[in-house]
Amino acid sequence: MWGKGLIEGMRVTWKHFWGKKETVYYPEEKLPMTERFRGGHLVLDEKKCIGCKLCAMGCPNAAIEVTVEVDENKKRHPVKYVHDLGRCLYCDLCIEACPSKCISWDKNYEAASYFKEDMKYDAVAECRGREKQ
Amino acid sequence: MAQTEHYILNMGPQHPSTHGVLRVKVELDGERIVHCTPVMGYLHRGIEKLMESRTYTQCVPFTDRLDYVSSMNNNWAFCGAVEKLAGIEVPERAEYIRVICAELNRIASHQVFIGSLLIDLGAATGMIYAFRDREKVLDLFNIICGARMTCHYIRIGGVIKDAQDEFLKETQKFVDYVPQMLQEYDNLFTGNEIFMERLKGTSIITKEDALRFNMSGPNIRASGHEYDIRKIDSYGVYDRFDFQVPTGTKGDNWDRYRIRFEEIRESARIIQQALDSIPAGPYMAKVPKVLKPAKGDVYHRVENTRGELGFYIVSDGTTKPYRVHIHRPSFINLQALDTMCKGLLLADAVAAYATVDPLMGEVDC
Ligand code: SF4
Ligand code: SF4
């Protein structure tokens, strides 16, 4: 009979009308991110970083720029660690390349910004800001 | 005597029903299509060229951006090619995890197909159902690799992280849900008379035409040609699983829709078998940090969700590929659009685009 399928479809829709909601009220309500989630800013541990620049070398899109300083004990420190979110592929290769395991993701997925310039940030400055708090 | 002219209409590149930035130049005689020419290149990023200046490891994330709704299959195709080139043996467990991820991705991609086909035909509600369930697969990817679409999970030599118990458990839950999900789709739209009448007998591609155009994937199977790389040139551990290759008879829009529908069922069967027999052990082979495959070239192909995806890589013995060429199924399948649409009404052309299921990221590369 023509129209039987239409009525069957209506029945499915009607059932869901009373069923459980599948969505959340973003931004009031946010879903938790998983343990392995890749996204947001790079959290740098300035003390652990040996300034080897392997992260920048491993990056396929040249999204990381590290400026290194050598102190009187011939130890290398990062003074600037600019990460350009606009170029980042979130591929994790930088984190995998780091020998001292001093970078990780902050898991913030709200990376949109009004201006292109705002997509760059200095991870060393962010690290110092965290320590001050 | 009054003279009439054919009217040229541009559909796209920003038309809501052309799936990304595809532009189709349609020559119309009244409502009927005389000719339609796909115009490509709006999403060209030069990925083949970019790969020449990246190391083999660095190339993998770029493959995510080809067919971005089935990135696992893309990763696998490239990594498989490099493994062949460098003679790397992939551990058992990694092969099983790859199969699970690739088939999950096939399901997710076919759900995008179903969803976008429905919305193109004007059934916005139906699209929400397909995308709701696709979300479940994307959540699984989020657990295993931390990304939902651009996974970059399958790497040269295996997979980057082991599959946790949580992932396997959740995957089992999803596989158990698949029959119920398909039943709901059947009730909601497969049986819908308007939907059937729009699709049945329209945009027919005969088997001869499909072969002539060198089509692959569900599109050629819908025309009745059983061509599936997983069967004819098996890779990974696909030869250990029992699954059918659904084929159509007529090659119309309806067949192309039904085939993908059945493929979801078969993919779920493969995942179930893989989950039942997944071995323990290492998930990554010993791959040298600086990968320098010997001089030579290689072609490796996999059954991507859209057809035969192949990577041709030429190595000059350095850390970077000398040349990469990508055989993209969407690009080739799209060539049949003119034959499919000739003589049809303009509104049916929209259904034809949707059932060919091109993905512009892959077409333009
Ligand atoms: S995630 Fe990838 S693209 Fe982004 S900074 Fe790290 S290596 Fe570069
Ligand atoms: S790889 Fe790690 S240790 Fe080396 S510069 Fe980058 S963040 Fe610092």
Image: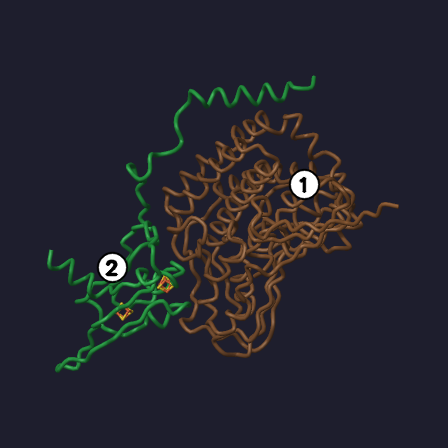
Chain colours: A green, B brown
The amino acid type found where label 1 is placed reads Arg
Residues B32 and B363: in front is B32
Residue lying furthest right: B1
- Picture coordinates of residue B283, whole percent (x, y): 42, 56
Q: Quadrant of the C terminus of chain B?
A: bottom right
- Picture coordinates of residue B47, whole percent (x, y): 53, 65
Q: Chain of mark 1?
A: B
Q: Label 1: which residue? A: B256
Contact check, label 1 and label 2, Cβ < 8 Å: no
- Asked where in the image residue A27 lies, by quadrant, the reply is top left
Q: Kindly identify the residue that appears in the image at 63 percent across and 22 percent down.
A: A5
Residue B114 tag number: none
Q: Secondary structure at mark 2?
A: strand
Residue A43 tag number: 2
Instruction: Answer with the quadrant where ligand 2 appears in the image.
Output: bottom left
- Picture coordinates of residue A4, whole percent (x, y): 64, 18
Q: Chain of mark 2?
A: A
The amino acid type found where label 2 is placed reads Val
Q: Kindly identify the residue that appears in the image at 60 percent across and 39 percent down.
A: B120
Residues B336 and B302: in front is B336
Answer yes or no: disc 1 within 8 Å of ligand 1: no
- Picture coordinates of residue B72, whole percent (x, y): 50, 53
Q: Secondary structure at mark 1?
A: helix
Q: Residues within 10 Å of mark 1 (few under 14, many from 20)?
A: many
Q: Kindly identify the residue that appears in the image at 37 percent across and 61 percent down.
A: A86
| Badge 1 and badge 2 both on one subunit | no
Q: In this image, B198 relative to B135: left or right?
A: right
